[in-house]
């Protein structure tokens, strides 16, 4: 199985999972809203809750994918080689790891404390 096919399968699995979670939360939020006497607004509250959840899930997913690519030394946007740089933390400040892609301008930083960062 090629990398692309694997990626497609994973995305489909994630899509299915988000849908299930969204439907579950839609039902729960709508039920609760009904019980709280919100009546007609309940459907809207259910939809809003489910939509928010899907957005959160997908942003986690995209963060995961980006970090995965970065850990492998590849730019998540253009696939080119990308090197990480590290700035040690000092006096209680956490260390910072950052990446900058020379070809597409992608930039990202994460707080990361290594064993050589000052405690
Ligand atoms: Zn460090
Ligand atoms: Zn790039």
Image: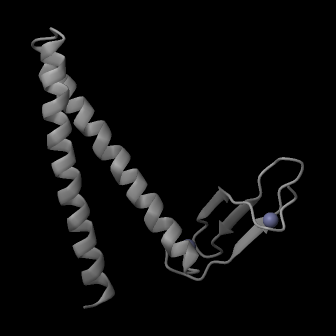
115 and 68: which one is in front?
A: 115
Taking the view exactly as shown, the residue that stands out farthest to the bottom is 1
Colouring of the image: one colour
Question: Residue 53's quadrant in the figure?
Answer: top left
Look at the picture and state if 65 lies above or below 19.
below
Question: Residue 101's quadrant in the figure?
Answer: bottom right
Residue at 49 percent across and 66 percent down: it is: 66
Look at the picture and state if 106 lies above or below 24.
below
Ligand 2 falls in which quarter? bottom right
Image location of residue 48, percent across then percent down = 25, 30
Look at the picture and state if 118 lies above or below 104.
above
Total numbered badges shown on the rendered structure: 0
Image location of residue 21, percent across then percent down = 21, 47
Image location of residue 20, percent across then percent down = 16, 50
Residue at 42 percent across and 54 percent down: it is: 60
Residue 114 placement, left or right of 57: right
Question: Residue 113's quadrant in the figure?
Answer: bottom right
Residue 4 placement, left or right of 97: left
Residue at 77 percent across and 58 percent down: it is: 95
Taking the view exactly as shown, the residue that stands out farthest to the top is 37
Image location of residue 1, percent across then percent down = 25, 91
Residue 5 placement, left or right of 102: left
The quadrant of the picture occupied by the C terminus is bottom right
Residue at 15 percent across and 8 percent down: it is: 37
């Amino acid at each position: 199985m090629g990398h692309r096919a694997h990626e497609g399968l994973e995305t489909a699995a994630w899509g299915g999972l988000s849908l299930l979670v969204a439907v579950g939360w839609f039902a729960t939020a709508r039920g609760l809203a009904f019980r709280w006497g919100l009546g007609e607004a309940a459907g809207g509250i259910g939809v809003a809750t489910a939509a928010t959840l899907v957005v959160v899930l997908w942003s986690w997913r995209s963060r995961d994918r980006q970090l995965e690519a970065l850990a492998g030394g590849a730019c998540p946007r253009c696939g080119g080689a990308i090197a990480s740089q590290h700035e040690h933390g000092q006096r209680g400040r956490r260390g910072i790891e950052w990446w900058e892609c020379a070809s597409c301008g992608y930039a990202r930083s994460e707080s990361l404390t290594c064993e050589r960062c000052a405690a």
